[in-house]
Image (cartoon, grey):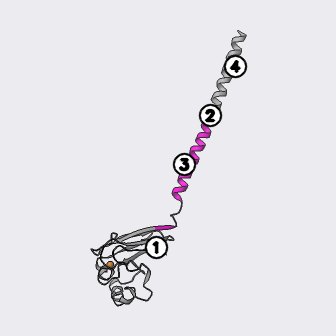
Amino acid sequence: MKKLNLVLALFVSALVLVSCKDAKKEKKEVAKETTKVETKVAKKAAPASKEAVVTIEGNDAMQYNKKKITVKAGQKVKLTLKHVGKMPKSAMGHNFVLLKKGTDLAKFSALAMAAKDKDYIPSGDLIIAHTKLLGGGEEDTIVFDAPEKGEYDFLCSFPGHYAMMKGKFVVE
Ligand SMILES: [Cu+2]
C-alpha cells in the first residue's frame, strides 16, 4: 500500500512538473506573438517613406495618363515624365510643370507661349518644378521637395496643350 502511494505521489508530481513546463512554454509563445503584433503595428504606424516615386506619361493624342498625383507633405518627389508617343518635340512636345498655388492657368499659358526660346518655361517665380520639354520616346526625371499641404495645378506648357494636359497635384 505504501509503495502504491509512493508511485502515485511520484506520478502526480511528474504531472505537475509537465504541466508547469507547458505553461512556461505557452507564456513564451504568447510573448513571442505579442512582439510580432507589436512589430507589425510599429511598421504600419511608421511615417510615410521619404520619397514619392511618380511616373506620368504624355502621348501623341495630347494627353497625360494621370489627372491627379498625390504625395505626402515632407516627401521628396522623384517624378518621371515619359513621352510615349512618336511625334517630334516641335509638333507634340510635352513637359510637366508644377505651378505655385493660385497661379492662373490661362495667364501662365500665355506667358509660356511667349517663351518659345526657353522651351515654353517662362521666367518668374510661378513654377515649383518642371521637366524638360520632350519629344516622342524621350523621358526626364526631376527631384523636388513636396510643397506644403494643399492642392496645386500641373500642366504641359507647350502652346495649346494645357486645355487637355493638366491635372491636380495634391499634397496630403
Ligand atoms: Cu504637351
Pick the residue in front: 133 or 124.
133
Q: Residue at x 29, y 83 (%)?
A: 160
Q: Amino acid at mark 1?
A: Lys
Pick the residue in front: 162 or 43.
162
Q: Amino acid at mark 4?
A: Leu
Q: Amino acid at mark 2?
A: Ala
Which numbered disc flags the more N-terminal residue, 3 or 4?
4
Q: Residue at x 31, y 79 (%)?
A: 88
Q: Quadrant of residue 5?
A: top right
What is the CA distance from the residue labelled 1 to the residue labelled 4?
72 Å
Instruction: Check if mark 3's residue and mark 4's residue have beta carbons within 8 Å.
Output: no
Q: Is residue 45 magenta?
A: yes
Quarter occupied by the C terminus: bottom left
What is the CA distance from the residue labelled 3 to the residue labelled 1?
32 Å
Q: Quadrant of residue 26?
A: top right
What is the CA distance from the residue labelled 2 to the residue labelled 4?
20 Å
For disc 3, the neighbor class at 10 Å (few under 14, some 14 to 19, many from 20) is few
Which numbered disc flags the more N-terminal residue, 1 or 4?
4
Does the Cβ of the disc 3 residue fall within 8 Å of ligand 1?
no
Mark identifier at residue 10: 4
Q: Chief secondary structure of the magenta span?
A: helix
What is the CA distance from the residue labelled 2 to the residue labelled 1?
53 Å
Q: Is residue 39 above or below residue 160?
A: above
Residue under label 1: 149
Q: Quadrant of ligand 1?
A: bottom left
Mark identifier at residue 23: 2
Disc 4 element: helix
Disc 1 element: loop
Q: Which segment did they paint magenta?
A: 24-52
